[in-house]
Amino acid sequence: MKYITPLIILTFMSVFFSCSEEKIDGSAEIFGTVKGKIVSSDTFEPLENVKVFSSPTSSTVFTDAEGKFTISNIKVGEYSIQAQKDGYLSKFESVTVNKNLESEVVFELTKNTGNNLPPLEPKIVAPLDNATNQSLSTKIEWAASDPNGDVLSYEVTLRNDKSSTVLIYSGIKEKELLLTNLFYGTKYFWQVSVTDSKSKPVFSSVFTFSTLSFPSTRYLMVKKINSNNVIFAADQDKNRYQITSSETNSWRPRKNNQSGKIAFIQSNGSQNHIFIMDADGSNKTKVTNSVSIAGFNPDFIGFSWNTTGDKLIYPNFDKLYQINSDGSGLKKIFETSNGKFISECDWSNDGMKVAIKVNDNEGYNAEIYVINLAGAIISNVLPSQTGAVGSLNFSITGRKLLYTRDVSQYESPNYRQLDNRIFEYNFDTSFSVQITTEKIAGTNDQDARYSPNEAEIIFTNTSNDGTSEKNILKIEVNPAGLNALRRETLFTGQFMPDWE
């Protein structure tokens, strides 16, 4: 085991030469055993009656005539095992306790000459205590010294006010540490301990700082990072902020302004489920459980909030479900009569009707119609079509519905689209018009949605080759909704936009 320091205050856990993370939970208790031997560092003779105990606290035991000890029934985890004997400098060693296994540790205790003085208490240098608006990468600095001029090493413990996570940074040789990947709008508590390897660690006071608040954002979008879809938010100045991990596959973000929550789809084992999170990506919770969101192709599936943000609707193959945003109240509200899959849905602002797009198991023979919450079809928007259809979005009044359609009517096993264009259906006239977007030949316009004031439409444009970069654009639409006035690129390399 790595020699760290002679003493430890019982409130701190074992150390590594990198950052470790510990969480407090209520999991079932599992036990192991720690065995060891303690000898004198100068003669290597076994030491009897050495007091041995752990941090976190377990039972206290004493060594036998052979210097051996056993701590039984100790919960699995990381521990600091401390050895104390009069006339010797106390010492601790780190040990990992595993389920139903014996962990071993050996101590070499040094005689106490009585001439050493402990280090002085560390003092804060930066940032100042209670500092605010700190970066998500913040360097903490402190001052420390030793009366004997001994070489010092440091350990920093970091907590925050949003979780029970405790981070311990050990084996630090400099009087500074760069903290990275901090959270927005979070208060952090940090404490540093110093040791000269001869006396007990000396602890500083607990210092605090707060990170800057998450900026106000209006846009949501997705970017492909390696093989995963990753969700970003952006402000009015088009500054982008990553809000889901690059290690998970997350897509189709939808924000509800009344609840302040963002719903999105995320891979979860072999299934895809709906999750919600705060605007900064924190407080992520899983909404769907027994019935996942599913259809013919995960990249072309969608769900919808209700206006107040306490319910969602989503498809599972040929069925449409409603669920509360806390995961309760799951119920089926519609099932197709012909076995077609429901791929997209959009809930009207007044909560009285739902637009759905259905298709066969290859994504084709698509139809768009509107149902009420009793599951009755009340409007037929688009009869069965050859080629791809998608991008459902009601206007605020519910009198218009935005959608996209591949006018080439091309169909292929990989669902390639050749000439996807934006359309608007008017329920007053029962007539669809194509929104003129001055689309470049050989590209597709898709993922179309109204802007918050409905004077513009935001959408994704990309080459129809299926491999080129995707960009998010917007167009201004004249009052008649017939002709685009200006086509503007908002974000490059992003797709699946949401603008609230």
Image: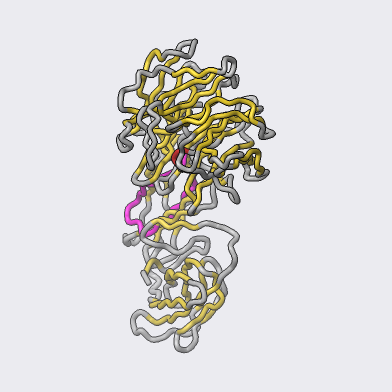
Figure disc tally = 0
Left or right, 427 with respect to 196, comes to right
Provide residue 89's location: percent of width, then percent of height.
42, 73
Q: Quadrant of residue 470?
A: top left
Provide residue 115's location: percent of width, then percent of height.
38, 69
The residue positioned 57% from the left and 74% from the top of the image is 59
The residue positioned 59% from the left and 21% from the top of the image is 398
Report the colour scheme. secondary structure
User: Residue 147 versus residue 375: which sits nearer the camera?
Assistant: 375
Q: In the displayed structure, would residue 343 be above or below residue 147? A: above
Q: Could one spot residue 243 in this view of the protein? A: no
Question: In the rendered structure, which segment of residues is drawn in magenta?
Answer: 170-193
Give the farthest residue toward the bottom.
65
Quadrant that contains the N terminus: bottom left
Q: In the displayed structure, would residue 468 be above or below residue 448? A: below
Give the farthest residue toward the right.
374
Give the farthest residue toward the top.
479
Provide residue 433's location: percent of width, then percent of height.
47, 17
Q: Could one spot residue 194 in this view of the protein? A: yes
User: Residue 230 versus residue 234: which sits nearer the camera?
Assistant: 230
In the image, residue 404 lies in the stretch drawn in magenta = no
Provide residue 254's location: percent of width, then percent of height.
51, 34
User: Residue 217 versus residue 71: which sits nearer the camera?
Assistant: 217
User: Residue 331 versus residue 125: which sits nearer the camera?
Assistant: 331
The residue positioned 44% from the left and 59% from the top of the image is 202
In the image, residue 180 lies in the stretch drawn in magenta = yes
